[in-house]
Image: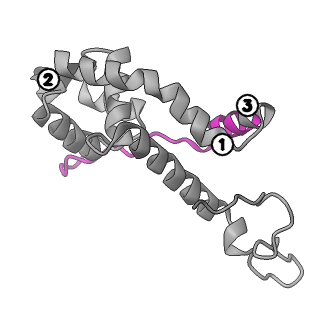
Amino acid sequence: MTTPRRDPASTDAHAPEADAATGSPIGLHAEPGHLIRRAHQLAVSTFHDTHGRQITPVQYALLRALEEEPGIDQVTLAQRVALDTSTTADIATRLEAKGWIVRELLPRRQRSLSLTDDGRTVLAQMLPKVAPMYGQLLGALAPDEQTEFLRLLRKFVQLNDSPPPVESSGKPEA
């Protein structure tokens, strides 16, 4: 039995606004970080309910980026999906072990990444389920609220996006 959803945007005794005069903190359920974490949990849960657990949302993002830009180097891939290069390398290693991508060594120790036929097949099986998955995720919102939510989410990310830190080689700059 599912618990009925309540509208947290309505008055919520557990989510008081901060009192500027007293300096009291806002309630947990009104904190942006908590709400973003909960939204992420909902998105990941919906992803796994739709696609199973053989692929993660981050692995999917890498596959989609490689579909859009076949043969890009690993550093550029990391930038495209907003991950650090070490994490991207670890995920690429897992995807390569699954047979979904191939990594080829380039000059200066860079790697070119591309989807394999199996990787393209995995994506081809997933893509028809993506729009319905997001319809389910956002379905509690009215269509105009969905549009506004996504607009504000894109704006929030763009305004707060900074490139991932460049990892040091450990050698001093010349």
> Label 3, label 2: how many angstroms apart (C-alpha)?
37 Å
Q: CA distance from mark 1 to mark 3?
A: 14 Å
Q: Amino acid at mark 3?
A: Thr
Q: Is residue 26 left or right of residue 57?
A: right
Disc 1: which residue: 156
Task: Give the x, y percent position of residue 108.
Answer: 13, 26
Q: Label 2: which residue?
A: 102
Which region is colored magenta? 148-174
Q: Is residue 156 visible?
A: yes
- Left or right: 104, with 34 as reference point: left
Q: Residues within 10 Å of mark 1 (few under 14, many from 20)?
A: few
The quadrant of the picture occupied by the C terminus is top left
For marks 3 and 2, the one nearer the N-term is 2
Number of the front mark, 3 or 2: 3
Front position in the image: 100 or 114? 100
Left-right relation of 96 to 11 = left
Write the residue at 25% across / 41% down: 54
Q: Earlier in the sequence, mark 2 or mark 1?
A: 2
